[in-house]
Image (tube, rainbow, N blue to C red):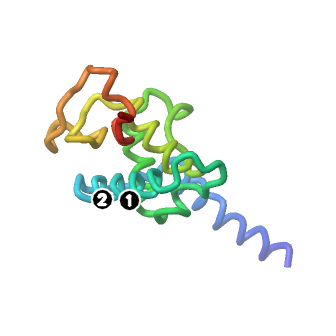
């Protein structure tokens, strides 16, 4: 029984650690834009609510992983990057904070995919509607 438990842990632990840190979530710009729209829709519908689930739970694992990967790609540090427990609002704020490349109202669209470097800090947080 003990040997079976050790074998099971030996199989599961490296898989779990790799999924957390080393795996690159490959995605297209279209997938990223769809995930961003999904997260934005959820965040706007629940803006100001104190208790919200993680974005992963709210919009699904794959879309949330795409947003996290894009945030990790553009952030200067893994400590300031978006995490799996972040709410959708937090992921979108994190993307806005780290990105210089934009496409319309969506932060972190790479230059080769039609993004443009924007140095205007007033555009940060553009995923939220402007207050009148």
Q: Please indicate whether residue 56 sits to the left or right of residue 98 in the image.
A: right
At a point 47% along the width and 65% down the height, the residue shown is 60
Whether 73 is drawn above or below 67: the answer is above
Q: Residues within 10 Å of mark 2 (few under 14, many from 20)?
A: some
Q: Which mark is residue 85?
A: none
Residue at 28% across / 53% down in the picture?
A: 33
Q: Position of residue 40 (x, y in %)?
A: 39, 51
Comparing 63 with 12, the one in front is 63
Who is closer to the viewer here, 6 or 22? 22
Within the image, what quadrant is residue 130 found in? top left
Task: Name the residue at the right extreme.
Answer: 2
Up/down of 19 relative to 119, above or below = below
Q: Which residue sits at x=41%, y=47%?
A: 69
The quadrant of the image that shows the N terminus is bottom right
Q: Marks 1 and 2, how far apart in space?
A: 6 Å
Return the residue nearer the eye: 50 or 89. 50
Residue 126 located left or right of residue 43: left
In this view, the residue in front, 9 or 129, is 129
Quadrant of the drawing holding the C terminus = top left
- What residue does disc 1 label? 38
Tag 1, which secondary structure? helix
Mark 2: secondary structure: helix
Furthest-bottom residue in view?
Answer: 1
Provide residue 13's location: percent of width, then percent of height. Answer: 66, 60
29 with respect to 127 (left or right): left
Q: Is residue 75 above or below residue 39?
A: above
Q: Estimate the x, y position of residue 26 in percent, counting from the top left.
A: 33, 55
Whether residues under marks 1 and 2 lie with C-beta atoms below 8 angstroms apart, the answer is yes
Residue under the image location 38 percent in, 59 percent down: 38
Q: Quadrant of residue 30?
A: bottom left
Q: Which mark is residue 34?
A: 2
């Amino acid at each position: 029984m003990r040997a079976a438990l050790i074998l099971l842990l030996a199989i599961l632990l490296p898989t779990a650690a790799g999924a957390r840190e080393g795996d690159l979530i490959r995605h297209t710009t279209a997938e990223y834009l769809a995930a961003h729209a999904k997260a934005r829709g959820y965040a706007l519908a629940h803006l100001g609510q104190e208790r919200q689930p993680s974005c992963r739970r709210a919009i699904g694992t794959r879309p949330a992983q795409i947003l996290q990967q894009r945030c990790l790609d553009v952030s200067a540090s893994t400590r300031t990057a978006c995490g799996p427990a972040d709410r959708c609002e937090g992921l979108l704020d994190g993307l806005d904070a780290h990105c210089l490349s934009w496409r319309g109202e969506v932060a972190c669209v790479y230059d080769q995919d039609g993004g443009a470097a924007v140095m205007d800090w007033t555009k940060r947080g553009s995923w939220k509607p402007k207050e009148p």
